[in-house]
């Protein structure tokens, strides 16, 4: 079950990254969106990049809902934040945006935060459950709520 | 920092995304463990249980607002500004909102992770 848990978290990360990137690519091709052109905005899903981006974001949504059914929001969000590192790498590779030293530092902080929360308990115990059970993830002993 | 449109979009995305996240997390906790439910009663039961939870639709509505704000934001600003900036603010807002509205236990480990990630994401927006 632990492997499947990390698979779902990885799915959230990858699907949201690729989805966002494809949407950005599509919207750049279409030109600026504007409040005066609502029909243009609605028709933007016909663009292949935007369309595929939306499909990937739907896959993201399904895995996100699955994760939220067994884990806390404050666990799922930091645990899947590697997607912002992936966005930066894709922005560099596909859009040739520069990655500065500051941004590399940001990447390191995010990676540290992800490691921190992912090693800990994934869910707040329901009332009546033994609280020790879910707080035990910190050192060596790993008890996941599954 | 002088791109007013991009930062307006970022503010709207943050507010809508936090509202959506909290509502969806609440809805899915009421639905229960999706994997176990799927195994026991099949995918149809999962879908029916989710569609029978009104909070789910409110969450989706808030997420739709965040999604369309993101489409606007992405066409006005860089992918590497709009996405990290709104995300950083959303982490902080969500940690507080999950504690207040969802009664999640946000211990030292979670706060440290949320702060590290939010700081890292903010650095990436510079």
Image (tube, coloured by chain):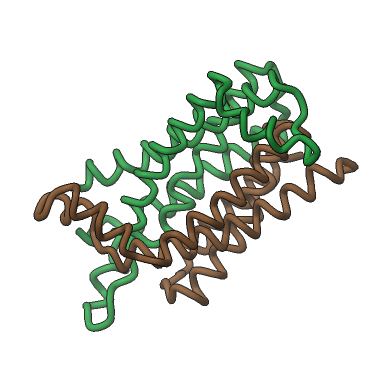
Chain colours: A green, B brown
Q: Residue furthest front?
A: A39
Q: Residue at x 64, y 33 (%)?
A: A104
Viewer-side residue, B33 vs B55:
B55
User: In this image, A127 relative to A74: left or right?
Assistant: left
Look at the picture and state if A59 lies above or below B122: above
Residue A118 x, y percent position in the rendering: 38, 50
The reply, left or right, for residue A2 in relation to residue B119 is left
Q: Is residue A135 above or below residue A65?
A: below
Relative horizontal placement of residue B63, taking residue B52 as reference (left or right): right
The vertical placement of B123 against B27, above or below, is above
Give the mark count: 0
Residue B15 position within the rendered picture, expressed as x and y whole percent measured from the top left: 65, 60
Q: Residue B50, located in which quarter of the rendered image?
A: bottom left
- Give residue A129's position: percent from left, percent from top: 22, 78
Query: Left or right: where does residue A102 sit relative to residue A132?
Result: right
State the residue at coordinates (31%, 63%). B52
Is residue A141 among what the camera can see? no
Q: Quadrant of residue A21?
A: top right
Q: Nearer the viewer, residue B96 or B24?
A: B24
Q: Residue at x 86, y 46 (%)?
A: B4
């Amino acid at each position: 079950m632990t492997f499947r848990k990390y698979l779902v978290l990885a799915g959230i990360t990858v699907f949201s990254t690729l989805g966002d990137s494809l949407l950005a690519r599509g919207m750049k091709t279409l030109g600026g969106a504007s409040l005066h052109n609502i029909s243009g905005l609605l028709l933007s899903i016909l663009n292949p990049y935007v369309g595929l981006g939306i499909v990937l974001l739907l896959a993201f949504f399904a895995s996100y809902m699955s994760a939220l059914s067994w884990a806390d929001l404050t666990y799922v969000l930091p645990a899947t934040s590697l997607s912002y590192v992936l966005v930066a790498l894709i922005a560099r590779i596909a859009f040739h945006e520069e990655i500065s030293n500051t941004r590399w530092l940001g990447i390191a902080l995010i990676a540290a935060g992800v490691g921190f929360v992912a090693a800990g308990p994934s869910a707040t115990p329901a009332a009546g459950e033994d609280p020790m059970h879910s707080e035990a993830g910190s050192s060596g002993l790993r008890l996941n709520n599954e | 920092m002088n791109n007013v449109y991009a930062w307006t979009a970022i503010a709207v995305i943050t507010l809508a995304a936090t509202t959506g996240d909290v509502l969806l997390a609440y809805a899915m906790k009421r639905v229960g463990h999706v994997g176990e439910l799927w195994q026991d009663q099949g995918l149809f039961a999962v879908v029916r249980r989710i569609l029978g939870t009104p909070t789910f639709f409110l969450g989706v509505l808030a997420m739709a607002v965040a999604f369309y704000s993101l489409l606007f934001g992405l066409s006005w600003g860089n992918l590497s500004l709009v996405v990290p900036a709104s995300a950083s603010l959303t982490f902080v807002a969500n940690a507080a909102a999950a504690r207040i509205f969802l009664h999640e236990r946000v211990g030292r480990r979670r706060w440290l992770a949320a702060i590290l990630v939010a700081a890292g994401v903010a650095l990436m927006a510079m």
